[in-house]
């Protein structure tokens, strides 16, 4: 990490608002310095005071303009004439760009065209006839033209609205207005209040009368547009959120300048989406930073009604100047298109695998949410960190096939939605593995009962179970692992029935290397409660004894005596054990997890019954199990006597049911009645 000895911090520029991020990039550009991101933005080897003076005295307004917009300066003859008549050095760049653009448009007739048609005409015609670098920079950042079978199409960069405007707010016209407010158009001299505006915006200083009621920031700063930051103390933000479309529009004019300087760092490119099967040729856009289409339910910005968009703003923790950053985001980040990344599901995976992007340590995620009466706004979602964790890597392909859709039953839709969001947060280190594994287990059971086009979850690695135990090193986890590890195995052939195969209809095809739902599923265990599962499992094992399938021949993990003692004593959360076991059944089971402990006493009837269950050459009879469930040890005593192991046991046991249920957990036999699984 960079040492901050020569770094100037800008605490008000954090990646949690789009306007702050764009301002930071604008400052990086105007300062000519190098910068990086920590908790906020930093510039190296620059004086904050010198930066204010530089913008105040040296900044030259650029010829930013979107001539197709009905509110553009080209439709306001008085403003355009004033710029062209100005002879000040400060407005030289704006004047030269507007002159060239005006000359190029003289031979073009757009009379009678709608705003949309005019945009297509000018976007197609002007770029090849205008050489002004700053205007071309603007037009490339606003959007791009693509040609489809049905005709030309304009793709916009959502950072700059729908073509350099949001509604009736034309950013370029507003830019011209604030520039002439800060610097005299004829002389180029700063106004009396210009320095206060700059200090407030650049340094974050509280200056009086530096927030103007003008629609300057559009969708980049919803707070300024949706409620009055200077509202009376007795009023809450909530009072301003739903205000019938009214907004305070408070903004600092310098914020708009820095916003546009930052936004014009980026350009767009388009390539065909080959997946489109019919209709015109569709294109996707990489209007940098990274614009993603987020499928319904796959991320926090989605809902059930359809697609939403996200913008991912790159953050970097090593010093970089503006030219290097522009080269990075306009050239190297083309991987978003090359890999057809259109969703948060695989974005981090692609970034993590691309070594060239290691300098981008994080991404600030913003959802383009539609707000009442005001269009789409950039709402902060959270930070995405490539490579922070590899959890979920095994599920990336599955998640693409497991998106919630409107056609799904509500219960399935709700569960898939929460799973998608949990897995994404898990990938960011913001969720527990325990939550994810419990949800995946619930989904497996649900999908075994309904017809679904969502494929089964692929087998997960041991790390999922290990991570759960690291989060919760408790008896419930240990018991769930032991239960999930059971796999009655044929004594002669070695054929096994893992718990997942008994719980659900999910099957694996080696030939296709894929999981699928089978119609040939007969051994549906009861999963309404842990007790129901244990009883149905014990019954099934007993029935299979005649077919030479034995549970002692197939387990992977043994529960410790203390974990079993806690269960028999009723000190465990049975619902947690059930949900974890269902989830762990999807995983490879580790042979070692928790150190075995044996400090708590166990009932003698249980110890003898468990020895019969988990010795390889013996098995429990149905009468013995049923007797324990009813609180009787008489059948157990009779079975032991028949095996030449007579034992005097109390005829009744208060915890008999818990002892019987505990027999599903593999354990080390307590008495040598037969050969053990060493």
Image: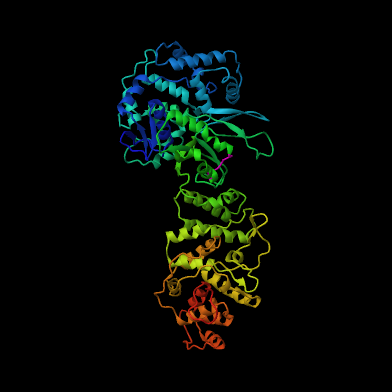
Closer-to-camera residue (393/257): 393
Horizontal relation, residue 440 to residue 52: left or right: right
Q: Quadrant of the N terminus?
A: top left
Q: Residue furthest front?
A: 678
Does any portion of residue 371 appear in the rendered image?
no
The image quarter in which residue 541 lies: bottom right
Q: Position of residue 303 (x, y in %)?
A: 53, 46
Answer yes or no: is residue 298 visible.
yes
Kindly report the secondary structure that dominates the magenta region of the rendered protein.
loop
In the rendered image, residue 287 lying in the magenta stretch gets the answer no
Q: What's the magenta region?
A: 339-344
Rendering colour mode: rainbow
Q: Position of residue 421 (x, y in %)?
A: 50, 50
Between 37 and 567, the residue placed more toward the observer is 37
Q: Position of residue 289 (x, y in %)?
A: 49, 34
Instruction: Name which residue lies at 49% across and 16% down.
Output: 98
Would you say residue 343 sits in the magenta stretch? yes
Q: Position of residue 178 (x, y in %)?
A: 40, 22
Q: Is residue 269 above or below residue 536?
A: above
Q: Residue at x 42, y 72 (%)?
A: 562
Where is residue 27, by image quadrant?
top left
């Amino acid at each position: 990490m960079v040492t901050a000895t020569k770094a100037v911090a800008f605490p008000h520029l954090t990646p949690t608002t789009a306007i702050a991020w764009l301002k930071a990039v604008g400052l990086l550009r105007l300062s000519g310095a190098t910068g990086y991101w920590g908790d906020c933005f930093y510039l190296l080897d620059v004086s904050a005071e010198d930066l204010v003076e530089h913008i105040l005295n040296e900044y030259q307004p650029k010829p930013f303009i979107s001539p197709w917009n009905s509110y553009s300066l080209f439709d306001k003859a008085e403003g355009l004439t004033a710029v062209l008549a100005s002879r000040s050095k400060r407005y030289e760049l704006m004047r030269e760009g507007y002159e060239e653009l005006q000359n190029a448009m003289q031979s073009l007739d757009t009379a009678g065209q709608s705003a949309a048609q005019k945009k297509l005409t000018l976007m197609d015609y002007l770029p090849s006839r205008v050489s002004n670098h700053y205007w071309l920079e603007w037009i490339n950042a606003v959007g791009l033209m693509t040609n489809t079978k049905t005709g030309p199409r304009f793709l916009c960069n959502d950072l700059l609205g729908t073509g350099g405007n949001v509604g009736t707010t034309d950013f370029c016209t507003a830019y011209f207005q604030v520039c002439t407010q800060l610097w005299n158009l004829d002389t180029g001299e700063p106004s009396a209040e210009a320095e206060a505006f700059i200090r407030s915006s650049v340094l974050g200083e509280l200056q009086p009368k530096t927030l103007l009621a003008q629609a300057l920031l559009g969708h980049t700063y919803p707070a300024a547009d949706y409620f009055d930051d200077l509202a009376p103390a007795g009023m809450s933000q909530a009072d301003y959120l739903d205000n019938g479309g009214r907004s305070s529009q408070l903004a600092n004019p310098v914020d708009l300048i820095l916003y546009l300087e930052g936004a014009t760092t980026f350009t767009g490119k388009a390539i065909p989406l080959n997946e489109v099967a019919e209709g015109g040729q569709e294109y996707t856009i990489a209007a940098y930073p990274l614009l993603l289409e987020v499928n319904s339910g796959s991320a926090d910005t989605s809902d059930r009604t359809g697609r939403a968009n996200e913008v991912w703003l790159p953050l970097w923790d090593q010093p970089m100047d503006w030219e290097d950053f522009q080269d990075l985001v306009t050239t190297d980040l083309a991987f978003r298109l090359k890999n057809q990344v259109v969703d948060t599901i695989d974005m981090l995976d692609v970034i993590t695998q691309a070594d060239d992007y290691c300098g981008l340590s994080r991404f600030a995620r913003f959802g383009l949410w539609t707000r009442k009466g005001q269009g789409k706004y950039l709402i902060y979602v959270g930070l995405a960190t490539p490579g922070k964790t590899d959890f979920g890597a095994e599920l990336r392909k599955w998640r693409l096939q497991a998106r919630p859709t409107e056609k799904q039953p509500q219960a399935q839709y709700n569960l898939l939605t929460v799973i998608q969001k949990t897995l994404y947060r898990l990938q960011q280190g913001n969720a527990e593995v325990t939550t994810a594994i419990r949800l995946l287990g619930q989904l497996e059971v649900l999908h075994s009962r309904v017809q679904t086009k969502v494929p089964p979850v692929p087998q997960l690695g041991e790390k999922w179970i290990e991570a759960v135990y690291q989060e919760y090193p408790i008896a419930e986890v240990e018991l769930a692992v032991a239960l999930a590890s059971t796999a009655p195995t044929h004594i002669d052939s070695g054929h096994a029935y893992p718990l997942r195969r008994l719980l659900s209809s999910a099957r694996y095809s080696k030939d296709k290397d894929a999981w699928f739902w089978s119609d040939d599923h007969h051994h549906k265990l009861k999963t309404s409660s842990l007790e129901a599962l244990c009883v149905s499992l014990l019954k099934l094992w007993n029935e299979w004894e005649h077919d030479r399938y034995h549970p002692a021949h197939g387990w992977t993990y043994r529960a410790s005596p203390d974990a079993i003692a806690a269960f028999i004593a009723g000190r465990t959360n049975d619902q947690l054990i059930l949900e974890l076991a269902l989830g762990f059944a999807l995983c490879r089971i580790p042979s070692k997890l928790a150190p075995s402990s044996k400090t708590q006493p166990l009932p003698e009837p249980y110890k003898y019954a468990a020895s019969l269950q988990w010795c390889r050459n013996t098995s429990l009879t149905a009468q013995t199990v049923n007797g324990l469930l009813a609180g009787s040890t008489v059948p157990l005593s009779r079975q032991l006597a028949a095996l030449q192991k007579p034992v005097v046991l109390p005829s009744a046991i208060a915890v008999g049911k818990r002892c019987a249920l505990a027999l599903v957990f593999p354990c080390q036999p307590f008495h040598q009645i037969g050969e053990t699984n060493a």
